Amino acid sequence: MIEREVTIKNRAGIHARPAALIVKVANGYSSDIFMEKNGNKINAKSIMGIITLGAAYNTTLSIVAEGEDEKDAVDAIVHLFENRFEEE
Amino acid sequence: MDTFTVLDLLDLDLIEHDALELKCFAGRPGLTREITVPDLNRPGLALAGFLDKFAYNRIQVFGRGETAFLDKLHYENNIEAIKKMFTYPIPCCVFSHELTPHEEFIQTAEEAGVPLLQTTLATADFSSRVIRALESVFASQKVVHASLVEVFGIGILIMGDSGVGKSETALELIERGHRLICDDAVEIRCVSGNILMGSAFNAVTSHHMEIRGLGIINVAHLFGVGAIRDKKQVQLVVHLENWDNGKAYDRLGSADEKEEILGVHVPSLYVPIKPGRNNAILIEVAAMVERLKKMGYHSAKEFDQNVLDWLESENARALYFQKEDKF
């Protein structure tokens, strides 16, 4: 199991478009991938779940992955956050 | 869980016989104080000067008796006990019957940064309501990746891996006249130790669904207000999974499997998915079977009993006929 912390750097937070992007990337991996905020863990392969987290600007989340390709999965998702989901 | 402050208590969205009818009349800056235990204290002993084992971390409730005692202390010019009580980090004081204490008390509380609240309710009524409200706030909680629907009055939690068809199954159930509580992120709370209450983890996104190929839809707008519900007890867990030829599925239905969620045992089923099997109808039937079980009628066991009875009578007849043959 791999866990990494990320901070949301795009102004709008995780709204529908970034959520769809995360799900798209997460679905490319066979590992179970979760996002955690305040002890609530949701599946990173579910758009509504991710939006439900209410992750606004500057929130810190942890990305957890478990499975064969866990390392690549976490790297890919962290990369999205660092890129600010290609937004401002 | 996030911290629960006095302001959160005032902001709780409770209606009718749950409403706390609270308002803050002094010490507003203290509204950020945290409430850490779901309990109350009547501070009679503390006011009388006895502070051993004073439950200062609870909400302090002042009824008619306590308020009358405060007045007595005021006339006697004896506010030492009050000052002493406020040296403890009290989350807040609540006055029932809309009672107001004298000015000196208010001043002391404000200096100590303790918010003072008032309720129109009687003390006993307020106590039972606030404990009920706090119990649900402090209940053990978890968020599960599932859909929660109400089918024929039974709260069914549909679980399964991503992409197995939870949302599509829930959508078909809604189409057939059942209700959606929440899709995708379901918050489950263990209330009064043995009830699992399911609701949307986030009210903003509740009653919305994401369906592959369609995008995000608003169920309340599309199917009407009759198709939604805010919360429902979880009474059955249905696991959807892709058909696995190597796995032995329950063929009789007499296993009565249970599953533990937050320490509560809930009946659970594993339903394999295959083209040609209609999940919505399967779940409808599972709901009806569950209702019958609650009424004391167990289809699988009843069937088994009938077979046993029949075998017994048949054996008896065979035995009888064999005897006949010998004569």
Image (cartoon, rainbow, N blue to C red):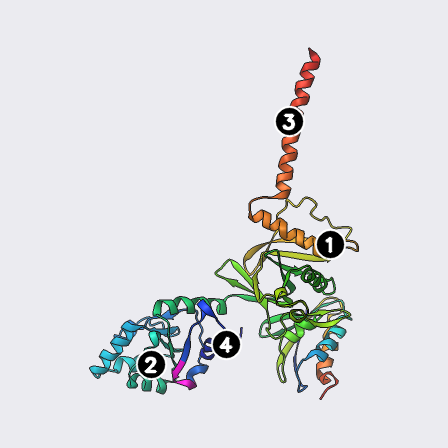
Which residue position is annotated with label 4?
B3
Q: Residue furthest left?
A: B76
User: Which of the two residues, B299 or A17, is positioned nearer the viewer here?
Assistant: B299
Contact between labelled residues 3 and 1, with CB atoms less than 8 Å apart: no
Tell me the CA gap for discs 1 and 3.
37 Å
Q: Which mark is residue B272?
A: 1
Contact between labelled residues 4 and 2, with CB atoms less than 8 Å apart: no
Whether discs 1 and 2 lie on one chain: the answer is yes
Q: Which mark is nearer the camera, 3 or 4?
A: 3
Q: Which mark is residue B86?
A: 2
Task: Specify which label sits upstream in the sequence, 1 or 2.
Answer: 2
In the image, B315: left or right of B55?
Answer: right
Q: Is residue A2 visible?
A: no
User: Residue B279 falls in which quadrant of the image?
Assistant: bottom right
**Residue at (78% x, 51% y) in the render:** B245
**Residue at (49% x, 70% y) in the render:** B137
Q: Which residues are magenta?
A: B24-29
Q: Amino acid at mark 3?
A: Ser
Tell me the CA gap for discs 4 and 1.
41 Å
Q: Please tell me whether mark 1 sits on a helix, a strand or a loop.
A: strand
Task: Specify which label sits upstream in the sequence, 2 or 4.
Answer: 4
Tell me the CA gap for discs 2 and 4.
22 Å
**Residue at (34% x, 70% y) in the render:** B123
